[in-house]
Image (cartoon, rainbow, N blue to C red):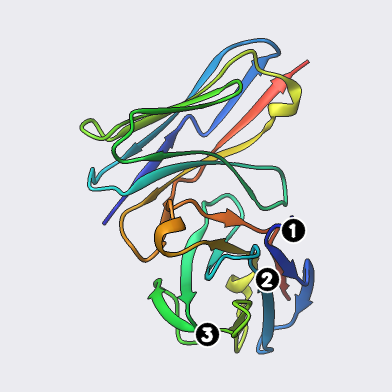
Amino acid sequence: KQEVTQIPAALSVPEGENLVLNCSFTDSAIYNLQWFRQDPGKGLTSLLLIQSSQREQTSGRLNASLDKSSGRSTLYIAASQPGDSATYLCALHRGSNYKLTFGKGTLLTVNP
Amino acid sequence: DAGVTQSPTHLIKTRGQHVTLRCSPISGHKSVSWYQQVLGQGPQFIFQYYEKEERGRGNFPDRFSARQFPNYSSELNVNALLLGDSALYLCASSPVGLLNTGELFFGEGSRLTVL
């Protein structure tokens, strides 16, 4: 059974700081990994998708990496802003049935 | 372009009642998946449908059922509601076949409260 762990559960940083969110998983046989953002009471916004053959993806101030051999992914956020405050979730996709296995998320607070 | 749309956005039911939640996928997406997210947890997979057939099912009781219509929209039905069914129900869509990258796109969810 695939287990996904996100550390830390919560993180508070001052505005402008660079930060890293971590996601670890137990089964390296993944199809892809997707990072999402969730604002309180809202749905999920897709941030980055990394295919199993890729090592990283970048979008603006966000960079996500994938190391299947160690069962880890990181989401790097550069020059954090108060608007980045949200819960960040990583999710793994193993096969063709579109099932994603999620971690519990990291609650990020960026203080002005 | 419209994203994934879900209705209703919020609803309150009492134990034992039945609920129907609706989802319209992004135009051109033929696959729809349903997830349940209880407070403080990540979403849990319930169902996946495309071409009107169930293609995957998570570890949920038979009180949960779903269907997909010819226009690819979908309904999630939950019977005999329990307090523990209170959650945010999320719908996700994705293309299939050659257009499929594996990326899922989620709606804003339907917040169900069972009293």
Q: Nearer the viewer, mark 1 or mark 2?
A: 1
In terms of secondary structure, where does tag 3 sit?
strand
Of the residues shown, which amino acid type is indicated by label 1? Ala
Q: Position of residue B15 (x, y in %)?
A: 68, 84
Of the residues shown, which amino acid type is indicated by label 2? Ser
Q: Is residue B111 left or right of residue B80?
A: right
Residues packed near mark 2 inside 10 Å, few (<14), some (14 to 19) or many (20 plus): many
Disc 1 from disc 2: Cα separation: 10 Å
User: Which of these two is toward me, A36 or B95?
Assistant: B95
Q: Give the chain letter at badge 2.
A: B
Of the residues shown, which amino acid type is indicated by label 3? Ser
Q: Residue at x 39, y 72 (%)?
A: B59
Q: Quadrant of residue B82?
A: bottom right
Q: Residue at x 67, y 26 (%)?
A: A109
A44 in relation to A25, above or below: below
Q: Which residue is mark 3?
A: B65
Q: Residue at x 62, y 83 (%)?
A: B81
- Residue B24 numbered mark, or none: 2
- Which quarter of the rendering shows the N terminus of chain B? bottom right
- The answer to whether dots 1 and 3 both sit on one chain is yes
Labelled pair 1, 2 in contact (Cβ < 8 Å): yes
Q: Which residue is mark 1?
A: B2
In terms of secondary structure, where does tag 2 sit?
strand
Q: Give the chain letter at badge 1.
A: B
- The answer to whether dots 2 and 3 both sit on one chain is yes
Q: Residue at x 49, y 45 (%)?
A: A104
Q: Is residue A87 left or right of residue A49?
A: right
- Which quarter of the rendering shows the C terminus of chain B? bottom right
Labelled pair 1, 3 in contact (Cβ < 8 Å): no
In terms of secondary structure, where does tag 1 sit?
loop
Q: Position of residue A87 (x, y in %)?
A: 61, 38
Q: Nearer the viewer, mark 2 or mark 3?
A: 2
